[in-house]
Image (cartoon, grey):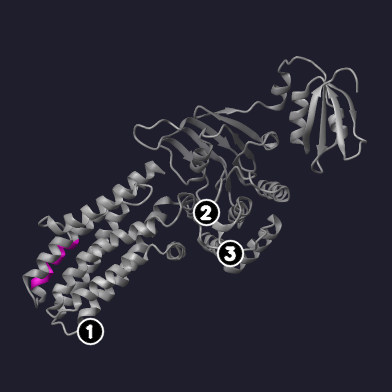
């Protein structure tokens, strides 16, 4: 393995009984250090199974998996409602399993709880927390200490907007520190921002089409009027207005809305969602404004 | 780290309170059998057979305490599914050791006749019974099986088989050994115990390895 932080799956197949259906059927995946790798796919396509295998929570039925020997963190889609410990106790135990000092764990978890905004505080049983808040506990255990590999199963689902932004920051910090990040998502913006993106279809990974490939697809050219609003700092009206196919753009409207007329709404929308815009409405241009 | 792992598993299992029925069943059974007089060896034989059943029950309770999703986090944090599974079995075994201590001391506090050889043999008998029980329990725990009906039927069948099948290690063999002599000397127990120990270790290793093999596929 050329890189200490790299992950490599070769010909991974998985089924849960001797005669069961192959949930994964020949998955190949390589992920380098300091990269964000995103896996998309329909519900039930096997994303969670694949991520558990990447993380080492489960083994493949066939095929090889290489991952950093130690220091892997895993965030499941949802913490079980049966978890009776409170957040502080649970995180304390997991910190000690990582061999971390008690004081370090206390300080780090406090800062992560603050950052992510764990609202009812750390002394409520995890099973009693809302989906979003228990997600914050799951994220906290994963970011307690730097790890070589971070595996996150739909980490953005259920998070409020503030926590979502903090997670973007935490992942960016981990990536900068050389962590390999593998996560699943249904969010096209997350998919578009990744270093590598894949769709899991029929138990196999297919590379998600890149931006140039998507924009090269021929589509019927009708002028569409799209209304977008900026949801974070990355949103730049100038950048969108300068895209190919944009006929006109108006930003100086009350409420911070951007109205664009474009011949290539699919491409524009793809780019806009990935760069801090939210889609409000759209309809075919009828010639009148 | 092993200590941290056992502490975590124990803390989680303690909150679930599923450990309570087998523990109290064992204490009540021990009290009941010690209520009469007689030699200590009969108490030890009885305690060993009850401890087998209790060890199976405790192992299932401790092993199933974590939700599978929670187990996934633990396994990734520790870096080994095998270590986590063995630590759960180890935690169950530690509780059994506590119960074995109670069973061993009880007849001595009361007015039961005993020899040193009987006490040592009684101690080894508890250790072996608990080990075999934990090993059977490993086969009845998630992810090997999660069907409660099956767990109960197979668990009870294993206990009956241990009692009824002549020469079955360790329970039936221990009962036979303790039944042979009320006040045994070292020569009476050393030979049989060594053989039972070897058989029980082999049986337990086999059961735990089988459980691990099935668990790997089903995770």
Q: Residues within 10 Å of mark 2 (few under 14, many from 20)?
A: some
Say which residue appears at 54% left-offset and 61% top-offset.
Answer: A90
Q: What is the CA distance from the residue labelled 2 to the residue labelled 1?
A: 45 Å
Q: Chain ID for label 1? A: B
Secondary structure under tag 2 reads: loop
Let me know if residue A135 appears in the view.
yes
Q: Chain ID for label 2? A: A
Along the line of sight, the residue nearer the viewer: B173 or A278: A278
Pointer 3 residue: A88
Placement of the C terminus of chain A among the 4 image quadrants: top right
Q: Going by the picture, which residue comes out furthest to the left? A: B180
Tell me the number on the disc at residue B109.
Answer: 1
Q: What's the magenta region?
A: B188-197
Pointer 2 residue: A81
Tell me, yes or no, whether dots 1 and 3 are on the same chain: no
Secondary structure under tag 1 reads: helix
Let me know if residue B128 appears in the view.
no
Q: Quadrant of residue A23?
A: top left
């Amino acid at each position: 393995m050329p890189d200490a932080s790299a992950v490599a799956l070769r010909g991974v197949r998985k089924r849960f009984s001797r005669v069961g259906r192959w949930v994964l059927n020949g998955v190949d995946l390589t992920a380098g250090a300091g990269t964000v790798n995103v896996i998309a796919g329909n519900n039930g396509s096997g994303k969670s199974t694949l991520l558990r295998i990447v993380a080492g929570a489960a083994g493949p039925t066939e095929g090889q998996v290489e991952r950093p020997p130690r220091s892997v963190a895993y965030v499941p889609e949802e913490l079980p409602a049966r978890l009776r410990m409170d957040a502080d106790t649970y995180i304390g135990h997991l910190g000690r399993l990582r061999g971390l000092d008690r004081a370090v764990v206390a300080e780090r978890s406090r800062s992560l709880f603050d950052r992510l905004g764990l609202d009812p505080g750390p002394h409520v049983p995890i099973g009693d927390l809302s989906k979003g808040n228990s997600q914050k506990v799951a994220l906290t255990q994963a970011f307690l200490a730097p790890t070589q590999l971070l595996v996150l199963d739909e980490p953005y689902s259920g998070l409020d907007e503030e926590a979502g932004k903090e997670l973007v920051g935490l992942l960016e910090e981990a990536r900068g520190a050389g962590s390999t990040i593998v996560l699943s998502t249904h969010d096209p913006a997350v998919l578009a921002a990744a270093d590598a993106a894949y769709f899991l279809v029929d138990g196999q990974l297919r590379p998600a089409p890149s931006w140039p490939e998507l924009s090269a697809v021929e589509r019927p050219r009708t002028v569409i009027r799209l209304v977008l609003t900026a949801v974070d700092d990355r949103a730049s009206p100038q950048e969108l207005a300068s895209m190919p196919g944009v006929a006109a753009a108006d930003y100086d409207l009350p409420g911070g809305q951007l109205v664009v007329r474009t011949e290539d709404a699919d491409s524009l929308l793809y780019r806009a969602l990935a760069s801090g815009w939210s889609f409000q409405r759209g309809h075919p241009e009828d010639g009148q404004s | 780290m092993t200590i941290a792992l056992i502490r975590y598993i124990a803390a989680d299992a303690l909150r679930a309170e599923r450990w309570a029925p087998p523990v109290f069943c064992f204490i009540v059974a021990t009290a009941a059998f010690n209520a009469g007089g007689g030699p200590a060896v009969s108490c030890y034989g009885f305690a060993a057979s009850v401890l087998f059943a209790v060890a199976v029950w405790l192992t299932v309770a401790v092993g199933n305490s974590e939700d599978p999703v929670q187990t996934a986090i633990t396994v990734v944090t520790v870096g080994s599914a095998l270590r986590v599974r063995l630590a759960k079995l180890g935690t169950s075994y530690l509780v059994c050791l506590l119960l074995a201590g109670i069973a061993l001391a009880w007849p001595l506090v009361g007015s039961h006749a005993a020899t040193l050889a009987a006490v040592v043999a009684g101690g080894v008998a508890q250790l072996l019974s608990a080990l075999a029980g934990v090993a059977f329990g490993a086969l009845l725990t998630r992810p090997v099986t999660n069907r409660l009906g099956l767990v109960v039927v197979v668990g009870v069948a294993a206990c009956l088989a241990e009692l009824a099948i002549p020469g079955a290690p360790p329970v039936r063999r221990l009962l036979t050994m303790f039944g042979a002599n009320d006040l045994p000397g070292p020569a009476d127990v050393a030979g049989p115990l060594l053989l039972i120990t070897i058989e029980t270790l082999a049986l337990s290793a086999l059961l735990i390895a089988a459980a691990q093999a099935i668990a790997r596929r089903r995770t």
